[in-house]
Image (cartoon, rainbow, N blue to C red):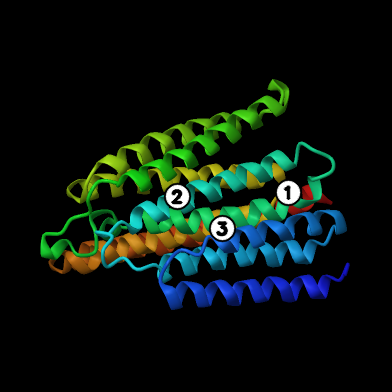
Amino acid sequence: MKSQAVLALSIALAVLWTSLEHFGFRHIHFWFLLVWISFLPIIYYQRWMPALHLALIALIIWTIFSFFGIEYKHAQNTQVYLVQIYFLLYLALFLSGMLLTTTENFHDFAKPVQNYSAFAALLSFYVLTFPDLQRGFRHWQDSYRTEASTNWLAITMAALVVLIGLALWHRIRTSVNQRPKYFIYGQFLIAAVVVLITLNLFLGGEYANWIAIALNLLFFAGMVWLLFAGTHTQNRTLINLAFSFFALALMTRYFDTFWSLLNRSFFFMAGGVILIVGGYLLEKQRRKFTTNAIEGSN
């Protein structure tokens, strides 16, 4: 019908459909993805940017529904494997957005794809940094998370292959002169992600604390990378996402430790003051980066 309003209503109807499927039948509703993919050619040929935003939001909503709608009662606390797949696929989508910047026909779609996929990937990664998720939520009943089943292993490995393939493709598409330093840094981060995610498939909940520490360190390293990437590409959204998730992770780790070590509360209160002061300084730096990005674009 060549109507953007009809397309927007179709996307909303698809979200309603998948929500009823998830919470009514307690399974991952993969059929939504086929319908979602059918929206993309229409958006591309009509160049409907608002519809692209709606479609990307719908995909994130489907992801959240899949996590909370699935029945884990008989899955032995394997939510961590689902979140890992989310993280890998949204990271792959972010790389796809970077690839779009190298083509003239898709260049206009690159920024929204990068922004929404970065948010979803960071949200998934943030969830992975919790030790309770890594060990299994029923660890107090001596029911630790088990190793990944054959299905989880196969899907995760396929997602890793897609991620590595897109990273290599982007490397081929950009010449040596077009690669800033943060590209090289990003390649090391992707290698670390591949190694850590692969190890986590075969480690049970007994090693949850070590895995959580490694994931937190990688998470903060990713924030630094995203900050440089946003500054280099003059993408204010990526800069704001980096600072927001950095602050969120710091406060989360602070309160996690604070409530488990109340007998040392004064020490952690002093740490809280340091975090507040540090947050103020980070906010000043964020505004400086944002101002530079705006001036650079003008």
Q: Which mark is residue 128?
A: none
Q: Residue 284, percent across and down?
A: 57, 58
Crowdedness near tag 1: few (<14), some (14–19) or many (≥20) residues, C-alpha within 10 Å: some
Q: Which mark is residue 85?
A: 2
- In the picture, residue 221 is in which quadrant? top left
Residue at left 57%, top 62%? 31
Regarding mark 1 in the picture, which secondary structure is present there?
Answer: helix
Q: Residue 59, percent across and down?
A: 60, 62
Which residue position holds label 1? 110
Report how far apart the C-alphas of labels 2 and 3 lie in the structure: 15 Å
Residue 215 visible within the image:
yes
Crowdedness near tag 3: few (<14), some (14–19) or many (≥20) residues, C-alpha within 10 Å: many
Q: Which mark is residue 119?
A: 3
Regarding mark 2 in the picture, which secondary structure is present there?
Answer: helix
- Name the residue type under label 3: Phe
- Looking at the rendered image, the disc whose residue lies closer to the viewer, 2 or 1, is 2
In the picture shown, does residue 179 fall above or below 54?
above
Q: Would you say 38 lies left or right of 104 here?
A: left
Q: Residue 41, percent across and down?
A: 78, 54
- In the picture, residue 231 is in which quadrant? top right
- Name the residue type under label 2: Ile
In the picture shown, does residue 249 fall above or below 174?
below
Regarding mark 3 in the picture, which secondary structure is present there?
Answer: helix
- In the picture, residue 62 is in which quadrant? bottom right
